[in-house]
Image: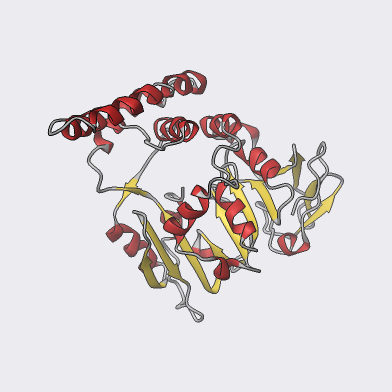
Amino acid sequence: MIESLNHNSFQVADEVLAVLLCLSCRGRLDQRDGELVCAECGRKYPCVNGVIRFVEAQRYAGSFGFQWHVHARTQLDTKESDRSERAFRRRTGFRPDDLAGKLVLDVGCGMGRFADVATRWGAHVVGVDLSLAAEVAARNLADRNATIFQADVFQLPFAPESFDFMMLPGLLKPGGRIAIWLYSGYNNWYKMSDLYRKVTRRMPPKLLHKLCWGVVPLHGIHQVLKKIPLVGRPASGALAYMIPMAHHPDRAWRILDTFDWYSPWYQSKHTYEEVFRWFESCGLEDLRVIEQPIAVQGRRPLYPEVGRLQDEKEIGQCVE
């Protein structure tokens, strides 16, 4: 874990340092004076606000960083709510016994919602995110067995076969399991939201976030409509089709999820057939459809065939 978030001091656990590689030459990295330094070519990776940066500042994913700074702890479980743990089970199929004592890679970790669950189950989690949400995750998980990096999914600083559970098969140990969750390509109401996103994705994040507060009264309208006999539910369905939004009972979650839906520039939807094709082309086996669409789990064989990872980049493009 990163043991300190004060200023730019840090201490990466030996287990994680052992799997880190330089992005330029794939040499090993050493810890020196508040940064990681390649032992081969000398390239430096600074620690800023408690997070090692493997990307340049101009490549940060802006809108996602905004939402997680505003909703830094909205999705973390509490004594009163275990929503994120239940969602993690539905989307991955993993259970506490699966992850206990394992090294887990969480790609696109955001503010650390699911990394929080995995660490509570006994895993050592390495989280990566392209946005400044990595800083939020580092703060949220400062007292957990977790290490957070800011990095690009297409240029990750890890050695092959490093992780027991994760998102990208090329970094998965033989016998390790991968689980991914993607937006479903089967939902018709996405058509309207995709139309609106042509405008909303161009909005300043603060303005879009204010507009998302409109889901608060709109949610109440849906509840009233559903109580009207005969015509109420069809009317609610028509309204939901015209103005797609989140319907969490918690107000903060509704606002966050609606913003999360309308803010990204790119948003791809997929089918089970596509995901199975990706997994099979990567040589994965024991494929399982998990509870929440579109979620699929697979296992890397103990003795994988040579040359079966050619489509790994295609999977990486779709990781949440």
Q: In this view, does 111 lie to the left or right of 182?
A: right
Residue 137 % position (x, y): 64, 43
Colour pattern of the rendering: secondary structure
Q: Can residue 243 be seen in this view?
A: no
Residue 275: quarter of image: bottom left
Which of 97/233 is in front? 233
Residue 252 % position (x, y): 49, 31
Q: Residue at x 53, y 50 (%)?
A: 82
Which of 17/24 is in front? 17
Residue 201 % position (x, y): 41, 27
Which of 261/239 is in front? 239
Q: Which residue is drawn at 67% across and 59% down?
A: 26
Q: Is residue 123 left or right of residue 311?
A: right
Judged from this view, the residue extending furthest toward the right is 33
Residue 4 % position (x, y): 81, 45
Residue 75: quarter of image: top right
Indicate whether 303 appears above or below 15: below
Q: Which residue is drawn at 55% across and 70% down?
A: 98
